[in-house]
Amino acid sequence: MSVHKVAGHVFISYVREDSDRVDQLQRTLLAAGVPVWRDTADLWPGEDWRARIRAAITSNALVFLACFSGSSLARNRSYMNEELVLAIEQLRQRTPERPWLIPVRFDDCEIPDRDIGAGRTLTSIQRVDLFGDSYDDGAHRLVSAILQVLGQNPDSPQTEDDGFDELVLIAGLSSRQVTLLRASAKYLRQAGIRFSEDQMQQALRSNATLWAWFRADR
């Protein structure tokens, strides 16, 4: 499958209760070739997680997705609130004509009416709904908006293959499993074992036992 290949990443901010919905959102973005930054896949043991998250938001985030739901609003304390504070600080430094922070709703909840500066609030920003009958249309509009922010035409035929991201779609792998596969490939290369990503992908597809093992929860 051909996908759009872009630099940087989309940062997804959410609460743990919405992890399944974020998995679905991540698969949708990867299908369009949009790289995603998530704490579950991009933080490694021993790292300063606060520093890594700050850098992921302030330095490398092409778009910040703030995912709201009844679950997120029910929590008085969450790391999502901390991430949102950082994101709003970044938003205030950016021109309002160029979208960066996009509110996402996972259910029929109210977007918090937070001050984002210049007389605007978070509710001033057009949201996208990813639930119920609105999901497909909302996902399409979200992907199109992100690609437009990146200066790409969503309908452009110029695409690049990325076999690992395709695994998410073909096999229903989680982001953690894809990250594990990438890490395994990196280790094999460092160990001097000659192989290609295509070979690994073909081996997984052609070996049912290996495929089933990899799809199992790691």
Image (spheres, helix red, strand yellow):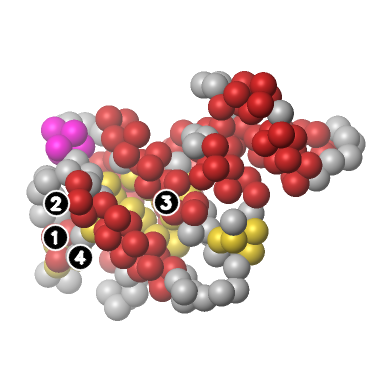
Q: Earlier in the sequence, mark 3 or mark 4?
A: 3
Disc 2 vs disc 3: which is toward the camera? 3
Disc 2, SS: loop
Disc 4 vs disc 1: which is toward the camera? 4
Q: Which residues are magenta?
A: 70-74
* Vertical position of residue 155 compared to residue 73: above or below: below
**Who's the residue at 41% across and 73% down the image?**
148
> Dots 4 and 1: beta carbons under 8 Å?
no
Residue ID for mark 2: 111
Disc 3, SS: helix
Q: Which mark is residue 123?
A: 1
Distance from label 1 to label 3 (Cα)? 24 Å
Classify residue 204 as left or right of residue 218: right
Which amino acid type corresponds to the residue marked 1 in the rendered image? Thr
Question: Is residue 72 magenta-colored?
Answer: yes
Q: Earlier in the sequence, mark 1 or mark 3?
A: 3
Residue 199: x and y in percent read: 78, 42
Residue ID for mark 4: 126
Q: Earlier in the sequence, mark 2 or mark 1?
A: 2
Residue ID for mark 3: 28
Residue 49 appears in the rendering: no
Disc 4, SS: loop
> Dots 2 and 1: beta carbons under 8 Å?
yes
